[in-house]
Image (spheres, rainbow, N blue to C red):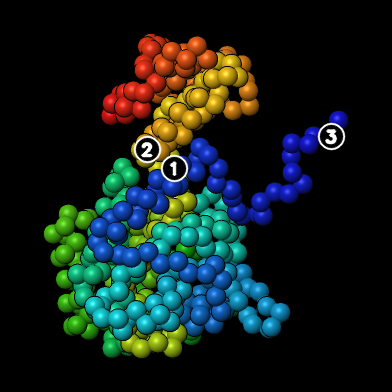
Amino acid sequence: MKNHSVSTFSAPKGTYDLLPPDSATYLAVREALAAPLRRAGYGYVETPGFEHVELFSRGVGESTDIVTKEMYTLTTKGGAQLALRPEGTASVLRAALQANLHRAGGLPVKLWYSGSYYRYERPQAGRYRHFSQVGAEALGAEDPALDAELIILATDAYRSLGLGGVRLLLNSLGDRECRPAYRAALQEFLRGLDLDEDTRARIEINPLRVLDDKRPDVQRQLVGAPMMRDHLCEACKEYHERVRELLTAAGVAFTDDEKLVRGLDYYTRTTFEFVYDGLGAQSAVGGGGRYDGLSEMIGGPPLPSVGWALGVDRIVLALRAEGVAPPLPAATQVFAVPLGEQARSGLFALVTELRRAGVAADFAYGGRGVKAAMKAANRSGARFAVVAGERDLADGVVQLKDLESGDQTPVARAEIAAELARRLG
């Protein structure tokens, strides 16, 4: 006998479907990440799921794995080369520049976003080909307080979820004044190492990325490599020290990590990563930094900016690893069970009334018997069931059943909404 319950299709490799009840946790995480941003004056931005390939090759960087190996690209019928967005910053900056938000007065322009991003990666726990992020960008101001603000907002978001095991790694990558000398010194050091052809090519394009190589044989050879901190100009040193002071004053602990470069070419000065050690190889749950030259890279005016992106999928994994469940609103608070056909329309009207009054209410659909309907009420997670037959409604009452204690009391139909509001607090 053929099984008709399974579709011919399944989700593409490396992707996932979000379904209840798990999806409620993802929504709660997104909301917790966004809430501190809203309080700090960040406005919501949404960009297309695909952009011109050049936006990412110029902005994210030709030498990055994201551009060379991981972008999903497509050619339109008109011959344009598009890419599914592999990250959010370049798109948000492009949108802000296109809309001239930087000319509307009042810099920085503060924006936050939430959405799906796409990279052709080797799928594993915590690394998918389609993943969800909440991000924030502050465009148009060079101010250590702005860098600190964003780091503090992310830290507060993790804390609000009850996630205690997140560590903050911090570094400075210098600027266009001091980085060229460091880059030359690093290139000279790296050229003397025993590295494969791809890595040797990277030395010439963006040598900082070699510091980020996770392979043990590469890391062993990097001992004694020149570090950016020894090459920072005075302005960058002062800037970084100010960020550190502001974080310390706000009670945000961090670890200085001189090898932290992150996987994107556009970072300058402040770079940071949030790490949760219980996730194994995919330990980064968020990160970001300052990208003062990105606007010019994509054809815009000088617009010093800073931002971050936090991975919703990995934060959910971290919450599970820590055994923390974020508080979720009740999907159903009241479940209505009609006794007989005549009571259905009366109780259905009550359900609509309760919903309009702000109560999460559901109904025993499908004409099920009382036993099956009460089972559905218990499964729904509702605190109360409202049960009524034709005679109850004729008498102007309904039976209010507490599904925790099992107590049942008659309540006047006209007063049930107020009584439920009182009992649900």
Mark on residue 358?
2
Disc with the residue nearer the chain's start (1 vs 3): 3
Distance (Cα) linking label 1 and label 3:
35 Å
Query: Can you identify the residue that label 1 sits on?
Result: 25
Q: In which quadrant will I find the C terminus?
A: top left
Measured as percent of width and height from the top left, residue 162 is found at: 31, 42
Q: Quadrant of residue 355?
A: top left
User: Looking at the picture, does residue 16 appear above or below residue 87?
Assistant: above
- The amino acid on which the numbered mark 2 sits, given as a three-letter code, is Gly
**Total marks drawn?**
3
Q: Look at the picture and state if 335 lies above or below 7.
A: above
Considering the numbered disc 3 on the image, is that residue within a helix, a strand or a loop? loop
From this viewpoint, is residue 43 visible? yes
Alpha carbon distance from label 3 to label 2 = 45 Å
- As displayed, is residue 64 above or below residue 339? below
Q: Name the side, left or right, on which 339 lies relative to 246.
A: right
Query: For this rendering, which residue is in front, 312 or 314?
Result: 312
**Coordinates of residue 299 in the picture (x, y in percent):** 44, 88
**Residue on which the image places disc 3:** 2
Residue at horizontal 43%, vertical 27%? 334
Question: What residue appears at the point 61 percent right and 54 percent down from the top-left corner?
Answer: 14
Q: Quick check: can you spot residue 168?
A: no
* The quarter of the displayed image where residue 223 is located: bottom left
